[in-house]
Image: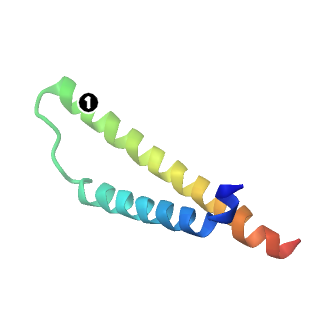
Amino acid sequence: MWLSEHKEALFGASGLALTLSGWAQWQNRTIPCPLDPMLRNACLRTRKASLRLYYASLVFFTVGGFFAFIAPLLG
């Protein structure tokens, strides 16, 4: 009940968090990984996993926004 009453603030805060996260992803995309091969591979794997998780979060945010704000107007 509380979530549906405050969905604007909830989506605003999550949108801000996703925006800041996207900015951090963009800023750190070219930071060099360590020279040690094992650490470098771990760094690259973590970077890819982080980007995938960010994209999945954007999809969930978009789908949630659709069902919270647009779908009620269509039905």
In the displayed structure, does residue 54 sit left or right of residue 6? left
Residue lying at the far right in this picture: please name it: 75
Q: Looking at the image, is 26 positioned above or below residue 69?
A: above
Question: Which one is nearer the viewer's eye here, 16 or 28?
Answer: 16
At a point 49% along the width and 52% down the height, the residue shown is 55
Q: Looking at the image, is 45 positioned above or below residue 13?
A: above
The residue under label 1 is: 41
Amino acid of disc 1? Asn
At a point 37% along the width and 57% down the height, the residue shown is 21
- Residue 24 sits in quarter: bottom left
Question: How far across and how far down the image is residue 11, in percent?
Answer: 56, 64
Secondary structure beneath dot 1 equals helix
| Label 1 CA crowd tier, 10 Å (few <14, some 14–19, many 20+) | some
Question: Which one is nearer the viewer's eye here, 51 or 65?
Answer: 65
In the displayed structure, does residue 25 sit left or right of residue 49? left
At a point 81% along the width and 76% down the height, the residue shown is 73
Question: Which one is nearer the viewer's eye here, 47 or 15?
Answer: 15
In the displayed structure, does residue 39 sit left or right of residue 3? left
Residue lying at the far left in this picture: please name it: 35
- Residue 59 sits in quarter: bottom right
Question: How far across and how far down the image is residue 38, in percent?
Answer: 20, 23
At a point 52% along the width and 51% down the height, the residue shown is 57
Quarter in which the N terminus is drawn:
bottom right
Is residue 63 at least partly visible in the picture?
Answer: no
In the displayed structure, does residue 74 sit left or right of residue 2? right
Q: Looking at the image, is 27 positioned above or below residue 39?
A: below
